[in-house]
Amino acid sequence: MVTGPRADSALAVEDRLYSALAIVRVVVTINMVGLNAYRRDNFEHPTVGLLVVVALAVWTAAAIWLYRDRARRTPVLLVADLAVVLAALAVTPWVKSPDFNATIPGFYVMGAFFAWAIHWHWRGGLVASVLIAAFDLLPRSEVDQGNYGNTFLVLIGGPIVGYLCESLQRMARERDAAERAAAAADERTRLARAVHDGVLQVLAMVQRQGSAAGGEWAELGRLAGEQERGLRSLIRQQDAVPTEPGGLVDLTGALEAMATAHPVRVEVATPGGAVLVDEHLAAETVAAVRACLDNVLAHIGPDANAWVLAQAAPEAVTISVRDDGPGIPPGRLDAAASEGRLGVASSIRGRIEELGGTATVESGEWGTEWELTVPLA
């Protein structure tokens, strides 16, 4: 399920990261209090310095509580968190001295830019790191190697942590999508098995016995056969729905969905299993097959019969489209192309060749057969 722009799984990952950040906040706060107590002689305004340290410690407790609830993790909270850190950096030159060495918060700044990195990923980590680095370096009269090293670590730490957080959330969403797709596939398999064991077998038996009985029973058998093919196609078509935009679809299900909706009577034979291909490849291949059937409708009529046979190999899929019409007169396709009528050239051959495949045609008094071969790699 998706509860807005971000999935529940991604929010669960964010919760865990903020829980880990709470431990980091406690550690850096203890470190900040201890170092400032050790360096208390460096304060020109020790009372104010004590108030700043106490305020940072109190904010740690407040931040841990505020970040615990998703509803409170708003941009206002994140801005306030960073503002507390920037304020502590800004007052350091006055509380200590203009030639101070270490800032009052020190490693305490990790809490704020990690929070930004978790919520806004690498962009948030970069923005927070740049602001913290600027407030740390600009007041200094000189920057030594230690100051440069700390600032460099802050600048690369924020984006890296943000990128890792984003990756974890994306992996959680992909895992959930895969689990939903697997559950849906299992349910479709269960339903297909139940339908096959019951309805499809009954329809097939009615078709056989009706055809053998003849007369009105033959018509009933024919209708039962059509319903059997339509129901079997409907079951297969469930796999033709991509789990996500740009994902994989079942080419056989897409072929059956197209064939059952075409005015020409079409019988489709496909492999027993799904043939998963890229969504674009499936769409273009089905469009080429539809163009073949459109030609059957245009030149023979709605009473024509057509057959679509799909065969899959590891490296390519081959689809044959055959009809029982009078065939194409020799040279008719070349003449149509020279006259500017490029229906076959563009709708069939053009599509298949753009996919890297081949489209060949054979025709005679027995009818016409197109063979479309599309590479899967």
Image (cartoon, rainbow, N blue to C red):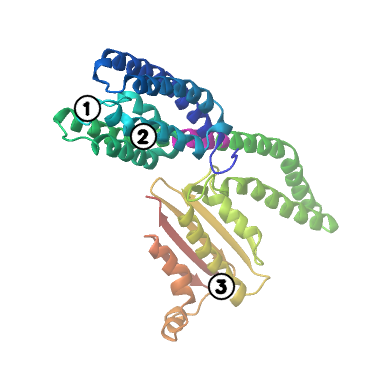
Q: Where is residue 83? Give x, y as percent.
A: 41, 35
Q: Which residue is located at x 37 percent, y 42 percent? A: 123
- For the point 85% across and 58% down, the residue is 216
Q: CA distance from mark 1 to mark 2?
A: 16 Å
| Residue 60 horizontal/vertical position (percent) | 44, 22
Query: Residue 23, position in %: x, y?
Result: 42, 18
Mark linked to residue 143: none
Q: Mark 3 to mark 2: distance in Å?
A: 72 Å
Residue 168 seen in the figure: no
Q: Quadrant of the N terminus?
A: top right
What residue is pinned by disc 3?
295
Q: Is residue 16 left or right of residue 96?
A: right
Viewer-nearest residue: 254 or 91? 91
* Amino acid tagged 2: Leu
Looking at the image, tell me whether mark 3 or mark 2 is earlier in sequence order.
Answer: 2
Within 10 Å of disc 1 (Cα), the crowding (few <14, some 14-19, many 20+) is some
Between 13 and 231, the one lying in front of the other is: 13
Q: Give the answer, above or below, for where 117 lies relative to 64.
A: below
Q: Is residue 203 above or below residue 79?
A: below
The relative height of residue 374 versus residue 363 in the rendered view (above or below) is above
Q: Which residues are magenta?
A: 170-180
**What residue is disc 2 on?**
86
Secondary structure that dominates the magenta span = helix
Q: Position of residue 151 (x, y in %)?
A: 24, 33
Say which element carries label 1.
Answer: loop
Amino acid type, callout 1: Phe
Q: For residue 100, which numbered disc appears in the image?
A: 1
Q: Is residue 200 visible?
A: yes
Residue 334 drawn in magenta: no
